[in-house]
């Protein structure tokens, strides 16, 4: 990172520190050790024992080397990421285990895993909803490492990172973000990355809608939730998804002007996982 950028970061940090006392940390560089880990995630969930605690399950998975990794430190890193993404809420863990055990189609499950991954990593979430979504709106398809590095640099200037990141850390994060989003199907391309045509199965959409509904009871606000930008969906496209889900009897959707009523057959994510899997 250039000396000028470092000076700007320091100036912003001093100013914000004087104004608010303590800066609120938003972004971490944990994506460097993470990636999508789709196959490993499914392996963990397939071996999950609901009679054991989270800690006991993670201990068993490491003891039995279910991932086939040579490095114990690497396994430890992976398990830490799993805990953050999928194991902090019992309802989510049980729902994902139910989906894996029911052989839920890979495309839908991958979309759900991607959604939950973004909920535990603000850097990953904002890279899509801020940087990529803005590109999508103007019809730009190609995305480079430099694009992401420049975007991260701006976030650092805004004081949104955990300390002052080195140039090497910024580059590694940018590369990791692009490869992670490629593996989740948001981007495509081995070397040169570009936005991928995203296919979100209606069952996966309905699951995410129920998850969001738990913290957002307003039907109208649910349609306009920022999380839909993770899939580059406009509000109109979200409404169409709700109508399709209604037709598939996954939920009930009624709209009369600004009055939107959305109801689900259950409020339990685990029970709903069984609904959409059937």
Image: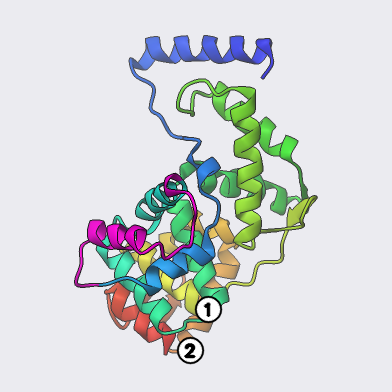
Q: Quadrant of the C terminus?
A: bottom left
Between residue 240 and residue 51, name the one nearer to us: 51
Q: Which residue lies at the image location 29% right of the left edge and 55% below the top edge?
A: 88
Label 2 SS: loop
Describe residue 180's horizontal placement relative to residue 82 as left or right: right
Instruction: Identify the mark at residue 39; answer none if there is no mark.
Output: none
* Residue 155 against residue 99 in the figure, above or below: above
Of 173 and 199, which appears nearest the observer? 173
Lower sequence index among marks 1 and 2? 1
Q: Nearer the viewer, residue 252 or 10?
A: 10
**Residue 264: quarter of image:** bottom left
Left or right of 91 on screen, residue 5: right
Q: How many marks?
A: 2
User: Colour scheme in the image?
Assistant: rainbow
Left or right: where 187 falls relative to 157: right
Expressed as whole percent of the image width and height from the top left, the position of residue 26 reads 43, 34
Q: Position of residue 66 (x, y in %)?
A: 42, 66
> Residue 61 in magenta?
yes
Disc 1 secondary structure class: helix
Q: Is residue 260 visible?
A: no
Query: Which residue is identified by label 1?
Result: 202
Quadrant (top left/top right/bottom left/bottom right) for the N terminus: top right
- Residue drawn at x 59%, y 38% is 173
Residue 172 appears in which quarter of the rendering? top right
133 versus 109 height, above or below: above
Q: Is residue 74 visible?
A: yes
- Residue under label 2, please give it: 248
Mark 1 neighbour density, 10 Å: few (under 14) some (14–19) many (20 or more): some
Residue 178 shown left or right of residue 24 in the figure? right
Q: Position of residue 167 (x, y in %)?
A: 64, 24
The boundaries of the magenta stretch are: 50-73
Q: Between marks 1 and 2, how big is the CA–CA gap?
A: 9 Å
């Amino acid at each position: 990172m250039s000396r000028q950028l470092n000076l700007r970061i320091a100036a912003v940090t001093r100013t914000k520190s004087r104004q608010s006392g303590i800066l609120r940390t938003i972004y971490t560089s944990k994506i460097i050790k993470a990636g999508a880990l789709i196959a490993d995630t499914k392996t963990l969930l397939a071996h999950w024992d609901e009679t054991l605690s989270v800690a006991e399950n993670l201990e068993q998975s490491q003891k039995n080397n279910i991932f086939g990794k040579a490095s114990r430190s690497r396994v430890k890193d992976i398990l830490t990421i799993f805990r953050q993404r999928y194991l902090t809420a019992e309802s989510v863990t049980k729902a994902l285990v139910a989906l894996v055990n029911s052989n839920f189609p890979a495309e839908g499950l991958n979309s759900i895993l991607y959604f939950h991954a973004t909920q535990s990593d603000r850097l990953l979430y904002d890279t899509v909803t801020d940087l990529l979504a803005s590109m999508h709106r103007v019809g730009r398809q190609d995305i480079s490492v430099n694009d992401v590095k420049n975007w991260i640099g701006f976030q650092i200037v805004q004081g949104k990172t955990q300390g002052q990141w080195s140039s090497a850390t910024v580059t590694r994060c940018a590369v990791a973000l692009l490869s992670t989003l490629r593996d989740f199907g948001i981007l495509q391309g081995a070397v040169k990355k570009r936005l991928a045509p995203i296919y979100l199965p209606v069952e996966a959409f309905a699951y995410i809608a129920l998850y969001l509904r738990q913290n957002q009871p307003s039907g109208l606000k649910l349609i306009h939730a920022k999380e839909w930008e993770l899939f580059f969906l406009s509000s109109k496209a979200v409404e169409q998804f709700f109508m399709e889900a209604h037709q598939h009897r996954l939920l009930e959707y009624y709209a009369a002007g600004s009055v939107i009523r959305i109801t689900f057959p259950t409020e339990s994510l685990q029970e709903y996982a069984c609904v959409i899997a059937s």
